[in-house]
Image: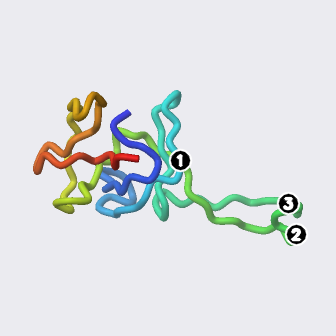
């Protein structure tokens, strides 16, 4: 997948087109991502430990990873991702400015 948990992304299509948010969860097996504040759904829940009163809970739903594009932290533009070997490790690189998207740990 071209995105990872913690990336800031721009939504390309759908009801939330143009919104930016951080990836909360990535599901590579299903090719889906959960983006903070985007693709909100309302879930009717019965009372339980987390929600003692139950009711209608609003939360983010997964969306296809192809509908989002990474926003480069260096140039602040939505960009495609290239893979490049730096110091013996494969890292994701911004196609527009050439900066590495993955921080060295």
Q: Earlier in the sequence, mark 1 or mark 3?
A: 1
- The residue identified by callout 3 is 46
Residue at left offset 40%, top offset 40%: 65
- 58 vs 47, left or right, is left
Q: Residue furthest bottom?
A: 53
| Labels 1, 2: front one | 1
- The residue identified by callout 2 is 52
Q: Residue furthest front?
A: 87
* Up/down of 21 relative to 89, above or below: below
* Up/down of 41 relative to 70, above or below: below
Looking at the image, which is closer to me, 45 or 88? 88
Residue at left offset 39%, top offset 58%: 15
Looking at the image, which is closer to me, 82 or 49? 82
- 19 vs 30, left or right, is left
- The residue identified by callout 1 is 25
**Residue 39 locus on image (x, y percent):** 48, 57
Q: Quadrant of residue 89?
A: top left
Looking at the image, which is closer to me, 23 or 73? 73
Quarter occupied by the N terminus: top left
Q: Quadrant of residue 48?
A: bottom right
| Labels 2, 3: front one | 2
Element marked by disc 1 = strand
């Amino acid at each position: 997948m071209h995105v990872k948990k913690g990336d800031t992304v721009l939504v390309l299509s759908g009801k939330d087109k143009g919104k930016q948010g951080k990836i909360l969860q990535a599901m590579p097996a299903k090719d889906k991502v959960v983006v903070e504040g985007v693709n909100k759904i309302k879930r009717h829940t019965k009372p339980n430990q987390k929600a003692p009163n139950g009711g209608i809970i609003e939360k983010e739903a997964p969306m296809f990873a192809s509908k989002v594009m990474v926003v480069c932290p260096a140039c602040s533009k939505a960009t495609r991702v290239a893979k490049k070997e730096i110091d013996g490790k494969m890292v994701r690189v911004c196609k527009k400015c050439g900066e590495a998207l993955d921080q060295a740990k």
